[in-house]
Amino acid sequence: MHNIAVMPGDGTGPEVVAEGLKVLAAAAARYGFEYETTEYDFGGDRYLKTGETLPDSAIDELKGHDAIFLGAIGHPDVKPGILEQGILLKARFSLDQYINLRPVKLYPGVETPIRDKGPEDIDFVVVRENTEGLYVGAGGFLKKGTPDEVAIQESINTRKGVERCVRYAFEYCRKRDREKNLTLCGKTNVLNYSQDLWLRTFEETGPDYPEIETDYAHVDAICMWFVKNPEWFDVIVTDNIFGDIITDLGAMIQGGMGIAAGGNINPEGVSMFEPIGGSAPKYTGQNVINPLAAIAAVQMLLETLGEDEAAGAIDAAIAYVTAGKLESLAVGKTGYSTTEIGDLVAERVGSA
């Protein structure tokens, strides 16, 4: 029995979550696993009513689940940063979700802005460290608001944090079993201390995985090669800030935020899965938003829970729908409503 916490969130989040749950139900019926869900209303509406984001009591409850399915966080009436820090970052840090896992996969029929590249060229995964680096929030101001103001933002990297991320990436590359190539993304020519720690840890861990080829590239070079030669990559491991940047570029080359999903992973605890796109509040209630990213998040959730056959069926169903059904991934231009796209995927999963 899988216990799944559901946080539909804001805007169109509840709409795409409903389609993800529809596909989850179809997969469970087809592949014979059991699950139960518990819904939580954390998001902008609750914050506006109560002033509460994600209380400590909720963290304790979430720890009792096997996974979390998140829709979207972001409300037009709430100042930017409050919900993101109070819900998303608090969950990641409190639940020690130290891996951000971002597949970058171009599905058939999906348009990429990169000329002459297809699904066979764009299929890699970024493993991003998720709880350290610049996102720790260490630093401060001196003489704030004056001409002599100084702002300091510190990147905190620990050997433990770096090594567990690097080792997860090696293990994931081994399990993925494709090119068996792991690339470290960094900036060793400028960032002498944090990047030296990353490079040394990467090089010292590599001999434990002799079947995996390793290489290194600066983050700026990787941004260029994502566009020029995305087929070069299999699995990439990197720190928090570089991972945040390159995964957004990755989302664009795989067709946009409407198809991109991600996981915040604690391999020893509870992990959280979400579509990468925002809450898109102006489309709320119109039944026009594309739910495929949320459905892909369910695919990742099941893969992490060990339901590999069901996860594979969802991945194949998404490919089936993108290849021959949708006119576009753009809002209102798919040729189908939000619920109809969910129906298409669920029916394909159920008949797989």
Image: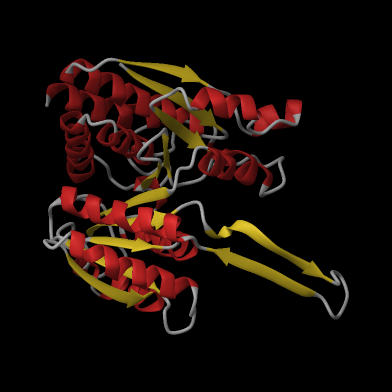
Image quarter of residue 210 = bottom left
Report the number of discs.
0
The quarter of the picture where the C terminus appears is top left
Q: Kindly identify the residue that appears in the image at 35 percent across and 78 percent down.
A: 221
Give the percent coordinates (x, y) of residue 69.
43, 31
Nearest the camera: 276 or 114? 276
Q: Kindly identify the residue that appears in the image at 47 percent across and 60 percent down.
A: 240
Give the percent coordinates (x, y) of residue 129.
43, 56
* Left or right of 14, for residue 186: left
Nearest the camera: 137 or 23? 137
Image quarter of residue 220 = bottom left
- The colouring scheme, among rainbow, by chain, secondary structure or one colour, is secondary structure
Note whether 128 is above or below 42 in the view shown.
below
Residue 73: in sight, yes or no?
A: no
Image quarter of residue 82 = top right
Residue 46: in sight, yes or no?
A: yes
Nearest the camera: 245 or 305? 305
* Left or right of 257, for residue 254: left
Give the percent coordinates (x, y) of residue 276.
44, 47
The quarter of the picture where the N terminus appears is top left
Note whether 100 is above or below 182 in the view shown.
above
Q: Residue furthest bottom?
A: 189
Give the percent coordinates (x, y) of residue 15.
46, 29
